[in-house]
């Protein structure tokens, strides 16, 4: 829905995140802490219209994905005034936005919590795929962490669906020997064409599958799992 800009209270001028799309700010909408994704564009009407289309595309995707504990809740958009904005619920720790990348850099996540986080990421990706969408830009900075209580574990929320597409609209590329057949097209993540990294990703996928088996007796212990992760080479 279209939101009225005057109902969005600006708490700080400092962004909590930024990218090619623009910047994200911590704001308050009708008494609720929110993240305002503020689109940036050139002054031309064509660029402004493209930014508006990009904003509405992401809003449409997030709305279509429905309710899930590891997805952002959308409040609405601002498209009839400047700046163009997407408004979603704020997820963070003690009023601070914390990405998975930041938590890993600061050694803020225990091994057990790390496994729990990745299981939840797998869960939300399964939900996204079941709705017929691909995220297309999964990385540490597009997973934010929240913690319900000071003593609780971190829980992930997958964000930034600006590059998301319907599964039915994408092209499947297959490996032919050591060459990726891609018809001259570039990858959002070029490293997937590198065999050593592809092997690494496949190994991690295998480990996640092992740890989520239906029968607990068939799952590796935390010690065995951590050793298998340590043995992964890339």
Image (cartoon, grey):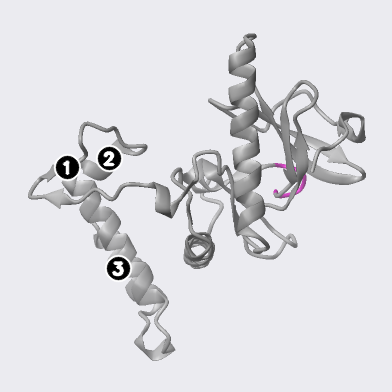
x then y, percent, for residue 27: 81, 36
Pair 1/3: label in front: 1
Image quarter in which the N terminus is found:
top right
The image's mark for residue 181 is 1
Q: Residue at x 66, y 60 (%)?
A: 66
x then y, percent, for residue 170: 37, 47
Dot 2 crowding, Cα within 10 Å, few <14, some 14–19, many 20+: few
x then y, percent, for residue 102: 54, 42
Task: Return the residue found at the far left.
Answer: 177
Q: Find the magenta span and give its range.
A: 92-96
Q: Find the distance from the CA under tag 2 to the CA under tag 3.
A: 19 Å
Residue highlighted by disc 2 = 191
Pick whichever of labels 2 and 1 is earlier in the sequence.
Answer: 1
The front one of 183 and 192 is 183
Q: Find the distance from the CA under tag 1 to the CA under tag 3.
A: 24 Å
Pick whichever of labels 2 and 3 is earlier in the sequence.
Answer: 2
From the image, give the main secondary structure of the stretch colored magenta.
loop
Residue highlighted by disc 3 = 206
Helix or strand or loop: what does disc 1 sit on?
A: loop
Pick whichever of labels 1 and 3 is earlier in the sequence.
Answer: 1
Is 95 covered by the magenta stretch? yes
| Residue 176 left/right relative to 209 | left
The front one of 149 and 36 is 36
Q: Residue at x 64, y 46 (%)?
A: 60
């Amino acid at each position: 829905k279209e939101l009225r800009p005057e109902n969005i209270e600006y708490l700080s001028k400092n962004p909590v995140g930024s990218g090619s799309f623009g910047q994200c700010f911590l704001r308050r909408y009708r008494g609720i802490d929110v993240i305002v994704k503020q689109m940036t564009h050139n002054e031309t009407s064509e660029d402004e219209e493209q930014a508006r289309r990009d904003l509405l595309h992401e809003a449409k995707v997030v709305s279509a994905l429905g309710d899930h504990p590891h997805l952002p809740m959308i409040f609405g958009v601002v498209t009839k005034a400047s700046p163009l904005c997407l408004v979603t619920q704020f997820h963070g720790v003690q009023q601070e936005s914390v990405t998975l990348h930041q938590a890993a850099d600061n050694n803020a996540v225990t091994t057990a919590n790390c496994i729990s986080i990745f299981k939840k990421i797998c869960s939300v990706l399964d939900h996204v795929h079941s709705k017929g969408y691909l995220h297309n830009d999964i990385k540490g900075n597009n997973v934010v962490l929240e913690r319900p209580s000071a003593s609780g574990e971190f829980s992930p929320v997958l964000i930034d669906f600006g590059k998301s597409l319907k599964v039915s609209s994408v092209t499947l590329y297959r490996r032919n020997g050591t060459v990726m057949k891609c018809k001259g097209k570039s990858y959002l993540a070029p490293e997937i064409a590198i065999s050593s990294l592809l092997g690494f990703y496949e190994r991690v996928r295998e480990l996640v599958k092992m740890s989520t088996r239906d029968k607990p007796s068939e799952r590796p212990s935390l010690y065995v799992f951590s050793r298998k992760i340590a043995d992964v080479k890339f």
